């Protein structure tokens, strides 16, 4: 029997993402949607002759009525599919500062990292597809977020001590649904994915169809390809910036300067694209909120280094303040209102 192209595409994605099987455990994040169910099924198939244990994991965000019952159904479904073990975890989403979508994402990553540590998993697999990648690139363009956002989602990333892997970035959402139908997997359609309150839902159901209609089919593939072309450049610049950031920190230590205090001359000596990345890393290290640290904040920081005309300070998200004193940029807690 010929293997359906959709099933073959999903399995190939897993095979390429996990070429070696050192044993141990992989964790597959599964919401019960077509993307993650297809990913879990392919992972079980590809690793069935190895010593790797496959754990299916559901994160319950508690944002919808009946979420606990849905989580229980997915756990049961994963067990029937042949996962060696299943797990679920409920999280509390803090949406006050960064919104529901971003808050849910951060809570999900933290929960998956916790589960990966608990099970000793060497990787967490995520079911993002080429369509998700295209939407991410388009959102980055619309927000003017710069090269890092337009480069889209990475195939692999490390958060803390946990490696996250995205095997399906060359697979379409249509293919994951077709793969589930062929394998008899009843997949869930998340109502949030079509809720117009959420920006990504509007991009998916309103903006992308217009682009496909007006510009022709293949827009999603083109946007995803743009991300693939940009990402190596962004990663190279980020690598240079990490090295420069380490040099700047060592310079501070040798000078026995206060923590989060950086020599203006050492910063100014860096090329602009590297310097702004270093300043962003410095702000995050001092406690700035990643999700709220915008391009404008970094440019204002850069102004303290290269365009200083006596500016008093720069306020940064995370109750942080940047000020230039005695030839150094200091990142320090902003005074509380009661401090006068």
Image: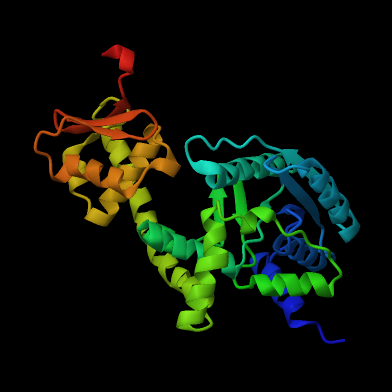
Instruction: Answer with left or right where residue 2 lies relative to residue 6.
Output: right
Q: Which residue sits at x=67%, y=39%?
A: 114
Q: Of residues 300 and 119, which is closer to you in this image?
A: 300
Nearer to the camera, 95 or 265: 95
> Is residue 242 positioned above or below 2 on the image?
above
Kindly indicate the quadrant of the structure image that contains residue 63: top right
Asked whether the viewer can see residue 233, the reply is yes
Q: Residue at x 31, y 26 (%)?
A: 332
245 shown above or below 92: below
Taking the image as shown, residue 253 lies to the left or right of residue 184, namely: left
Residue 290 lies, with reference to residue 207, above or below; the image says above
Which quarter of the figure has residue 7?
bottom right
Q: Going 57% across and 35% down the picture, which residue do you hit?
A: 94
x%, y% of residue 227?
A: 46, 68
For the C terminus, which image quadrant? Answer: top left
Q: Quadrant of residue 200?
A: bottom right
Q: Is 300 situated above or below 74?
A: above
- Report the quarter where the N terminus lies: bottom right
Q: Where is residue 13 in the image (x, y as percent from the top left)?
A: 67, 71
**Residue at the far left in the pictured view:** 309
Give percent across and percent down for residue 283.
Answer: 34, 38
Q: How many labels does the image show?
A: 0
Closest to the observer, 178 or 156: 178
């Amino acid at each position: 029997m010929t293997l359906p192209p959709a099933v073959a595409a999903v399995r190939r994605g897993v095979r390429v993402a996990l070429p070696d099987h050192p044993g141990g455990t992989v964790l597959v994040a599964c919401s019960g949607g077509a993307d993650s169910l297809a990913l879990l099924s392919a992972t079980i198939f590809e690793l069935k002759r190895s010593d790797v244990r496959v754990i299916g994991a559901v994160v319950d965000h508690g944002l919808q009525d009946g979420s606990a019952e849905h989580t229980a159904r997915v756990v049961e479904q994963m067990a029937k599919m042949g996962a060696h073990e299943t797990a679920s975890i409920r999280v509390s989403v803090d949406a006050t500062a960064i919104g529901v979508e971003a808050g849910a994402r951060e809570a999900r990553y933290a929960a998956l990292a916790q589960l990966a540590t608990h099970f000793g998993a060497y990787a967490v697999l995520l079911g993002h597809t080429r369509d998700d990648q295209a939407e991410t690139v388009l959102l980055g363009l619309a927000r003017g977020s710069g090269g890092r956002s337009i480069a889209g989602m990475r195939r692999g990333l490390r958060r803390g001590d946990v490696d996250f892997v995205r095997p399906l970035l060359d697979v379409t959402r249509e293919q994951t649904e077709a793969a589930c139908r062929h394998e008899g997997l009843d997949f869930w359609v998340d109502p949030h994915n079509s809720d117009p309150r959420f920006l990504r839902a509007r991009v998916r159901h309103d903006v992308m169809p217009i682009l496909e209609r007006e510009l022709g089919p293949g827009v999603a593939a083109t946007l995803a390809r743009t991300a693939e072309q940009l990402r190596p450049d962004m990663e190279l610049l980020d690598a240079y910036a990490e090295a420069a950031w380490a040099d700047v920190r060592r310079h501070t230590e040798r000078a026995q300067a206060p923590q989060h205090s950086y020599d203006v001359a050492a910063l100014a000596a860096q090329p602009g694209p590297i310097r702004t990345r270093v300043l962003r890393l410095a702000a995050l290290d001092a406690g700035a909120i990643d999700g709220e640290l915008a391009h404008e904040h970094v440019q204002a920081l850069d102004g303290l280094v290269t365009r200083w005309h006596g500016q008093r300070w720069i306020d940064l998200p995370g109750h942080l303040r940047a000020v230039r004193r005695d030839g150094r940029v200091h990142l320090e807690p902003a005074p509380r209102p009661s401090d006068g």
